[in-house]
Image (spheres, grey):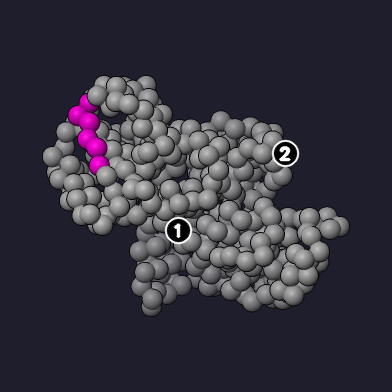
Amino acid sequence: MKHQVVVLGLNPALQSLVRHLTDDAGSGWLCRFFPTVGSYLQAPRLDNQIDLLIFDGLSVNASQEEKRLVCFQAPLALRVVLTTPEYDDVVMGHLRNFHTFIGVELHSEHLRQLFSNAERLSALPLSEQQRRLVGGLSDFPLLPALLQALDQLLNDSNVSAAAVAHLISKDTLIVSRVFQLVNSPYMGFASESWNLEVAVSRLGYGTLRSLVLLLSLQHEQQDDPQALVLMEQILVQAARARSYAKNSGFSRLLQDQVFAAALLSGFGALVLLHNGCEPGDAELQELNPAGRLSYTAVSAYMLTLWGFEDWIISAVLNQQQFQLSGVAAQISNCLYLARHQDSADKGLTELQRQQALQAGFVL
């Protein structure tokens, strides 16, 4: 089945680029164009058929309610708004109900990346109920500018810890958390360090990326005491998972991957809180008796949207039950078992228990 992109607006450059990317018979994409909000809303309901929605916020004059209705008819799609990125207030005014934005300087490579991300989102193993609840969220965080700058820096294989430390030194919250983590007993270093370059080297770039992403949303919710409590819970759970990996005798690399995946798992909980969920809601619980959306589904969705690696997304999604095999199974199993450390049987069948012991887990 082909993917479908819908473009709403009259931007000829945008339409030309989209046609160019979808005209190839092997592209796997179909495109539809609507000049106005009215023409789109009056069309037969497309709902599940739309994988990518591009809304031209510059040529289409629409109220916030009309934008909400547009997005409501594409709940499972990657939703992108074309706007003027030079002005933060303009961007933020458009972004409600949309996942991300593109500027007027259109590039085919940028659009190719959006098409690729939409395909990955479509392939995520989420239930229909999970997809619809994710699609119903209205406030989506932007990929943090600091993380984008950090990723650009890390693209250089010869990047130094000094350069990374210089970049993050501009954010006092990040710096304080880096020192808090690197000097915590969970990390297991022999001595404390209050040198940022040394701390960055000890923490590792992967963990640092996860921390930057997580703390970016805390910046937006810094006046919300519930978000601060949730952030501390995420950090404690991540530290426990890393400690469990260490006690199981796993390598430093795997310990760091477990820690990073645990941090990123909690990102979805912060997004849900930002969208009006309360701490007692089923979506924010570790064990979800109602069978509704787990916050890890939101985490996986956002990480896929931003192009994170498959192993992280698999670890985040699969940690709620023991995996006998699969991508990043050892990491997701470590997260699962760390969460169930206090349970006598840890929710394992006899076969799973034997597999866990063979893999080196401490039960």
Q: Which residue is mark 1?
A: 308
Query: Helix or strand or loop: what does disc 2 sit on?
Result: loop
Looking at the figure, which quarter contains the C terminus?
Answer: bottom right
Query: Helix or strand or loop: what does disc 1 sit on?
Result: loop
Q: CA distance from mark 2 to mark 1?
A: 29 Å
Q: Quadrant of residue 76?
A: top left
- The first of marks 2 and 1 along the sequence is 2
Residue depicted at x 58% and y 74%: 253
Residue 68 vs 141, above or below: the answer is: above
Residue 67 vs 355, above or below: the answer is: above
What amino acid does circle 1 point to?
Phe
Front disc: 2 or 1: 2
Residue depicted at x 68% and y 48%: 233
Q: Which residue is mark 2?
A: 289
In the image, residue 113 lies in the stretch drawn in magenta = no
Name the residue furthest front: 1
Binning the other alpha carbons within 10 Å of mark 2 as few (below 14), some (14 to 19) or many (20 upward) gives: few
Name the residue furthest right: 344
Residue depicted at x 72% and y 39%: 289
Magenta residue span: 31-37
Q: Give how far across and how far down residue 144 sits, in percent.
A: 42, 50
Q: Nearer the viewer, residue 73 or 213?
A: 73
What amino acid does circle 2 point to?
Pro
Q: Can you see residue 179?
A: no
Horizontally, residue 246 falls left or right of residue 159, namely right
